[in-house]
Amino acid sequence: MSHSEHSIERDSLAYAIEKHVEVHAQKCYQCGKCSAGCPVAEEMDLPPSLVMRLLQTEKSSNDDKVLRSESIWLCLTCEMCLSRCPMEIDIPSMMDYLRQRSRSEKKVNPKMKNIVSFHKAFLHSIQYTGRLFELGLILDYKRQSLKLTQDMMLAPKMISNGKLHFIPELLKDMPHITKIFKKTIVEGGSK
Amino acid sequence: MKIGVYPGCSLTGSARDYNESVFALAKAFDIELVQVPDWNCCGATAAHNLNRELSLSLPARILATAEKNGLDEILVPCAACYSRLIVTQHELKKNPELKNRINEIIGMDYRGTTKLINVIEWIDASIIPNLEGKITKPFDYKVACYYGCLMVRPNKVLNYDRAEDPQTMDIVMEKIGAHALYFPFKTECCGAGLSVSRTDTVSKLSGKIIEDAVHRGADTLIVACPMCHSNLDMRRPDINKYWKSDFKLPVMYVTQAIGLAIGLTPKEVGLQRHFVKVNIS
Amino acid sequence: MARIGVFVCHCGENISATVDCGKVAETVGKLKHVAFSTDYKYMCSDPGQTLIKDAIKEHKLTGIVVSACSPRMHEPTFRKAAAEAGLNPFLCEMANLREHCSWVHEKNEMTTDKAIDLVRILIEKVKINSALQPIRVPVTKTALVVGGGIAGIQSALDIANTGHKVILVERSPSIGGHMSQLSETFPTLDCSQCILTPRMVEVAQHPNITLYTYAEVESLDGFIGNFTVKIRKKAKSIYEKDCTGCGLCTTKCPQKKIPNEFEEGLGFRPAIYVPFPQAVPNKPVIDREHCTYYLKGKCKVCEIVCPTKAIRFDQPDEVIEVKIGAIVIATGFDIKRSNFFPEYGFGKYKDVIDGLQFERLASASGPTSGAILRPSDGQVPKNIVFVACAGSRDPAKGIAYCSKICCMYTAKHAMLYKHKVHEGKAHVFYMDIRSAGKNYDEFVRRAIEEDYVNYIRGRVSTIYERDGKLIVKGVDTLLGAQPVEIVADMVVLATAGVANPGAEELAQKLHVSYDSHKFFAEAHPKLKPVETNTAGIFLAGACQNPKDIPDSVSQASGAAVKVAALFSQSELTREPLVAYVNRTSPPMYSTCVGCFLCQSVCPYQAIEHEDFKTRDGKIIKTVAKINEGLCQGCGTCVALCRSKSIDLHGYSNNQVYTEVVALLNDY
């Protein structure tokens, strides 16, 4: 925890980030190297260095902008920012935290619903089979995102190339997986 | 020689070709690969995006199972799974309190003793030293080695190859007769887990990688990650549409290239399963 | 019988605001042997000192305790006052009631009680203090200046001009340092060599300066005023007295492909060479690492062509020993090279160069005669990118500090480029522009406003090559982190300034401290920026931290004044608070058993051997002896001595025990 704990806004997002993932937003001196190297910066509403700046203000209106941003969902966790950051700020870990906060505060940017749907469908698949069932995942995602025609051309070729199973492989100890999901997703409230 | 292996979900499905080439190589070099019993999915991108504890618990179950079954070393061919497993080891080592919490969730005794080996490390340790006299068809092609993100970053956790301009895969390829090209996109992200939910983004990012490799005269891209492979290979129609181009550059796994060099057939290493036809044999 | 005086100072309100000074004076006044006790608002003021002096005389005091601020502040003041009143200055002690009490505690009775205790223990100590005499040492009035860059040159000239002898030692074959490599200098754009070379010549001609180039300090012994230095004069392989500097040998040398250090690798030199045309001395040396004769045993072309037969292949290194009184360290700095930057290609791209390389390109005497040309193909770059803070302010790369000079020289580089390539475009990626200095910010503004240099606020993430161009990926943070991609012909990295290779080794040889970045450390960051914490050794220039020319020259003159002040005295006096080994009557001579554990722990190499001999010269006993000139009174030897044979003047074991006992006893 930071030396200056007494001077940081306790209800700020920056404080929560320090507490949960030990990332100290005030270390950022706005050089922009993260945004310059980020492969998706161009598509982001808030490039990573701007996210850092908003957090530094410790203002709730700016915290809100961050949690409602598209950027936190577009982040690929490619870790390029961290690997080049002169201050070694762990932006990827921070992004993981921000995504979870954004969901728990129901502030997910509406344009990003598909990305969240995909992640959810992915976890569903594991929850019920223990391993990823790719066909099930695609179908579940289509159901959630209503993108019914997407990738229609992909499936037949995947099947003919032997890359798509019709029947999921089930784990022997499925109750174990169910228990893990119960203790994390269900009890943690991030269903 | 016997070694544990965690294939991960992709290798049983969309990356069957990779799986086949890894097992074919193992067989050719008398290495017995023992699967972690009843292994589960590592949670991939979805888990760490949505739930931190789940993202640590799923890999912890895999690792604890390996420990329980006496698998001291496990090969993890999938770069994405490798990353999740090694990051979990790192996080739980750093934070004993968190480790206790995760052990409580999985109801097992995870200790963190398993040595994880990525595919290049495996090749370096078990294939390259025994290569002499085995190369029947030198892989005489110009290759662009594409490492992606997860083989080299986060560098401090992986403590593997250098984060900028890594060399390990280039060196392996040179050893089987290839000419490894200067390739500045070797660690740029392909778009990773957004393949389905943001196909346009993936087409753009993967397209940049392919375009640069084509521009530099590569005969093939060499990869070691199923996620990268699916974005660069299976997504090729989307890429070509986005870039208004007709890139035909094949994308091969490093294990497939080695397999061909030691005389395995294209089928034995799963080349027929690729979307982009591989004119290399 | 002891008669002690106590003087309690209020220090304005600094002490009296929390300590009841009247009560302190009153309470200790009642103690045994205290003959006089009072309090006063400012003891350090003239009336305060008079009060002390009068009391010493009137009450025939045998010792005094001034209870005021830290002895670091006013001990000299009060000891001088005591001496003026006829009391040995070492019979004056100071109780620190300010830093050790009033400043760090609340106002209450306990604080006053603590103040009383602090005074009490010193009353007990001063009772057993002995009168000490200052130590006097002679001064050798010759200075050693290490490093022949602009700082060393300036220091040497300034000292020499005060009439004292100077030995100037330079590691490379010529003096001049980095300044001789520079093209033009900010903020006036005057030619670096034009202003430097007259000083170099002056050094060579000055009757008080002895110049040793191609030489290094081998070792140093002694102490302030009395150092002995060993200097290794590396073999130049020529007999300098016969060499006329005609240069025939350098043109005929068949080995011509050695990367030229002076040109920062952008040109080549032969194995026998003069580093640059205006070199001082202008006589060649043979680089034995690359010379064909030394490598393969034959060639000797230089010997054949030399009209004066000055070549000496078998010349050995020569180590000379010189006595000197003071040292100025002016060994300068180095920069990180482009191979320090993984994200910018590990130094692989020929057209990504560093600042010193750009200086050579822009210099009229450089490899391109001042034309800005790409190293890869000799083309004029139409689009050039300058990257500031390359390595500096980058804790991830281990360099957290600002290198201070890069903002200015980057503006200069961009300007020089625009003056030479009118149609070209210059871009500067920066984080902050640090241009504090006379006419400095105006200079940067000129680059932006008059020369249209495109300043972009953001750091470059990566540089890669494609089709002979360099793709520079950065960002404009003033446009909300908008991506910027520049297809450049050449990139100049303003790489971090770092300590010179060998700085750490030299610091250890000279027994001076250095920081974690291997820069030499000053004795105090504000009030002793020129001194090191070894008496008699001073700093000048960028060996302390990256500095520009005006700063280096100013500090060099400052160091010279320190040396001159030292040399203005015929002998030095220093505080006698040093360790001593006891002496007893023969045949024991001392309780010291000669284990010399003390010698192994002494940080100042102050412990010597002393032999006691019979009349016919047979050694009876060897014991430790303290060199008073070197001893700093740290007490490490005292603590370690197993036979309790060493003690410290002014802080003897007995004095310290007395203080502790006083603290434990009620009063």
Image (cartoon, coloured by chain):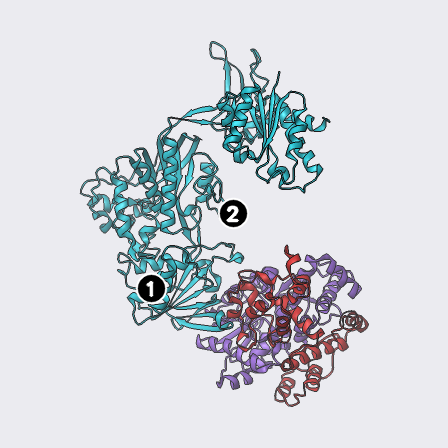
Chain colours: A red, B purple, C cyan
The total number of labels drawn is 2
Name the residue type under label 1.
Met
Q: If you read the primary sequence from the N terminus, does the residue marked by circle 1 or circle 2 appear first?
A: 1
Residue, far top: C615
Quadrant, the N terminus of chain C: top right
What x and y, as percent, mark residue C652?
Answer: 60, 24
In the figure, C586 relative to C324: above or below? Answer: above
Choose between B25 and C273: the one closer to the eye.
Answer: C273
Question: Residue C516 shows which numbered tag?
Answer: 2
- Whole-percent x and y of residue C634? 55, 31
Is label 1 on the same chain as label 2?
Answer: yes
- Subunit ID for the residue under disc 1: C
Work out how far the residue at label 1 is from the one at label 2, CA to CA, in angstroms: 35 Å
Write down the residue under mark 1.
C415
Image x and y of residue C445, in percent: 37, 64
At label 2, counting other C-alpha atoms closer than 10 Å, the crowd grade (few under 14, some 14-19, many 20 or more) is: few
C41 over C627 or under it: above or below? below
x and y, in percent, of residue B192 in the image = 60, 75
Residue C587 in sight in this render: yes
Horizontal side of C241 relative to A157 (left or right) equals: left
Q: Is residue C405 left or right of residue C212?
A: right
Most foreground residue, B256 or B145: B145
Q: Chain of mark 2?
A: C
Q: Is residue C238 above or below residue A185?
A: above
Q: Secondary structure at mark 2?
A: loop
